[in-house]
Image: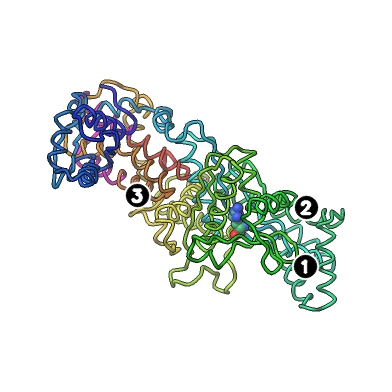
């Protein structure tokens, strides 16, 4: 019996066919709405009958009965079907269907092939991390990097070609003051050892030395004008600022397993804004207000009076102008079907205005509009609820944060597995430490503020990276004991359908992987995948306690090894999608 990757699709298609076959009024408009169900009610539930029946003043239960009567036989082969409550349809998979799915999805390639339909043939640009140059990356850019990378990987898994774009904040008035400070006080030694810190110091000196109305400020402005006019010396300095910043950022990205395809920062768009001013003005969207060029959105409660400022009164471009040019470039040059920008929630208004403007502008010009998503996240706070700072009140250096995670993991690993050689423990703590930071972020709904707690993220129990990484390593150790590879067990077709309650519970959880991916993807919220993996690890652990895997009976052993192999495959695939590395031994 052939089964789809996402069984929801099979059931959805079957119910639509049943609606036609049963001759329901307006059957084409019926949306089954099949979703993963509360496990007490079965595996999947369709609740679309209710809305459909209500809109047509039909009795939902009678409608559901008609649908069931017309269900194709193939569905009855897959699952037990029942009507519940006012007209829900519940589906409980049969063990043979569980086995069919498990056997069909025996490798990451097969999982990917199943998932790829969602975004096949599409190109998505993901703009994430995107820090400002000549400044330390802060914790917000780390969140953006972690969440953005998980979204990139899930998009790729679901078939998209992903373009990873680091949209650096590398242009703006701050460079006049920085150049001013640099030319007077740069310390070559500090630039060689701690470049970003030195640039921050020079900017601060430059800023302090150029108060409003002072001749020094005029001098800093002249430096900026020279930079904008292409003066070779200032351009070279600016380039140097970008280069050292990128080199420092690269260290962090490297440790997180992130590789950008492009670093098309704000500066890249500086010669592309004139076209934007022209097109938006010609389209009747932009108007001059107090010397500035602005876009009002009369239909919007706030933006009808609070316009989108897209060119400053002094004629200079700003964040809005470069972001409008960025949207156009991504649509025209990359032919993006979707654009995702990941920043903290404080930029919500900016992106709402940007997207509203882009939609209207593209419609006037007849440009193809990509799907536009602003993925926001909350603030990171310490356990005291205050902004995350060092004890002395400074910004936390991300490098130091990652180092501390690794050090703390090293202590835990050394305590748990003192028998492992030193180098092995070091390698493990790199994976666990960085994974703990990534996972702590990805395991919660990104919209909430996130409380940074070493104890919580490094706990061996609970929804943490160490817990999941241990689950993976434990399954590997079973295969080591069995003397077979998980890959071979995964391909074996000798297994019988799951039988014991723990086997069945684990198998039922495994077949929900596609739906977890779907949910995480539709909402661009990786925590749905994290939660799924955590629950899967729990079902695996229950199974492992209840049912011995390495028994003598070859049939039982093969069946359980298949479940182990599949749990391993899904856990590893899921963790890799979140951007974590996994290990065979901990
Ligand atoms: N550089 C900005 C910041 O540090 C984030 C940029 C996000 N991307 C964009 N296209 N605006 O807050």
Instruction: Mark 3 vs mark 1: give the one in front.
Output: 1
Magenta residues, start to end: 537-566
Tell me: residue 82, above or below residue 385. Answer: above
**Nearer the N terminus, badge 2 or badge 3?**
2
Q: Quadrant of residue 515?
A: top left
As for residue 106 lying within the magenta part, the answer is no
Q: Is mark 2 within 8 Å of ligand 1?
A: no
Q: Quadrant of residue 201?
A: bottom right
Residue drawn at x 59%, y 64% as measured from the top left: 307
| Mark 2 to mark 1 CA distance (whole Å) | 15 Å
| Mark 2 to mark 3 CA distance (whole Å) | 43 Å
Tell me: residue 389, above or below residue 511. Answer: below
Residue tagged 3 = 531
The residue closer to the viewer here, 47 or 77, is 47
Position in image of residue 240 (x %, y %): 78, 54
The residue closer to the viewer here, 420 or 300, is 300
Tell me: residue 226, above or below residue 44. Answer: below
**Nearer the N terminus, badge 2 or badge 1?**
1
Residue tagged 2 = 239
Tell me: residue 200, above or below residue 105. Answer: below
Q: Which mark is residue 177?
A: 1
As for residue 553 lying within the magenta part, the answer is yes
């Amino acid at each position: 019996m052939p089964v789809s990757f996402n069984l929801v699709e099979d059931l959805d298609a079957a119910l639509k066919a049943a609606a036609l076959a049963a001759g329901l009024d307006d059957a084409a408009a019926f949306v089954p709405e099949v979703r993963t169900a509360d496990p007490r009610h079965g595996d999947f539930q369709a609740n679309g009958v209710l809305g459909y029946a209500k809109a047509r003043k039909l009795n939902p239960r009678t409608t559901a009965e008609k649908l069931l009567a017309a269900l194709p036989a193939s569905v009855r082969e897959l699952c037990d079907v029942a009507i519940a409550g006012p007209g829900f349809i519940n589906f409980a998979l049969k063990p043979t269907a569980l086995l069919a799915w498990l056997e069909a999805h025996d490798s990451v390639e097969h999982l990917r092939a199943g998932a790829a339909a969602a975004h096949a043939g599409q190109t998505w640009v993901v703009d994430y991390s995107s820090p400002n140059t000549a400044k330390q990356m802060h914790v917000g850019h780390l969140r953006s990097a972690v969440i953005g990378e998980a979204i990139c990987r899930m998009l790729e898994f679901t078939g998209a070609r992903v373009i990873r774009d680091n949209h650096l904040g590398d242009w703006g008035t701050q460079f006049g003051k920085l150049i001013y400070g640099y030319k007077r006080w740069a310390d070559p030694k500090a630039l060689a050892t701690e470049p970003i810190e030195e640039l921050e110091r020079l900017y601060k000196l430059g800023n302090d030395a150029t108060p409003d109305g002072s001749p020094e400020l005029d001098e800093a402005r002249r430096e900026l004008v020279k930079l904008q006019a292409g003066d070779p010396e200032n351009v070279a300095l600016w380039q140097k600022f970008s280069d050292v910043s990128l080199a420092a950022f690269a260290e962090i990205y490297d440790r997180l397993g992130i590789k950008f395809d492009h670093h098309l920062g704000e500066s890249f768009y500086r010669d592309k804004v004139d076209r934007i001013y022209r097109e938006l003005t010609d389209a009747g969207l932009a108007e001059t207000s107090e010397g500035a060029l602005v876009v009002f959105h009369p239909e919007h409660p706030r933006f009808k009076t609070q316009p989108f400022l897209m060119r400053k009164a002094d004629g200079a471009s700003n964040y809005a102008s470069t972001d409008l040019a960025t949207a156009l470039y991504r649509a025209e040059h990359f032919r993006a079907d979707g654009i995702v920008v990941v920043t903290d929630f404080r930029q919500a208004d900016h992106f709402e205005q940007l997207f509203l403007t882009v939609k209207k502008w593209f419609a006037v010009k007849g440009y193809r509009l990509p799907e536009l998503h602003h993925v926001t996240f909350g603030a990171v706070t310490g356990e005291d609820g205050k902004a995350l700072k060092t004890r002395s009140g400074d910004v936390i250096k991300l490098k130091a944060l990652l180092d501390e995670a690794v050090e703390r993991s090293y202590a835990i690993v050394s305590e748990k597995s003192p028998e492992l050689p030193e180098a092995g423990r070091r390698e493990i703590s790199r994976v666990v430490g960085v994974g703990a930071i990534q996972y702590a972020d990805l395991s919660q709904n990104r919209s909430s503020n996130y409380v940074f707690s070493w104890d919580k993220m490094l706990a061996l129990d609970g929804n943490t990276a160490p817990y999941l990484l241990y689950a993976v390593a434990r399954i590997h150790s079973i295969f080591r004991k069995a003397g077979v590879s998980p890959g071979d067990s995964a391909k074996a077709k000798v297994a019988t359908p799951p039988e014991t309650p723990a086997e069945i519970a684990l198998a039922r959880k495994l077949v929900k992987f596609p739906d977890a991916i779907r949910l995480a993807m539709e909402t661009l919220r990786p925590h749905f995948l994290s939660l799924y993996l955590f629950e899967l690890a729990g079902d695996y652990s229950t199974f492992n306690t209840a049912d011995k895997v390495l028994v003598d009976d070859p049939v039982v052993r093969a069946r359980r090894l298949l479940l182990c192999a599949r749990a391993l495959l899904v856990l590893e695939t899921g963790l890799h999608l979140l951007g974590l590395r996994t290990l065979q031994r901990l």
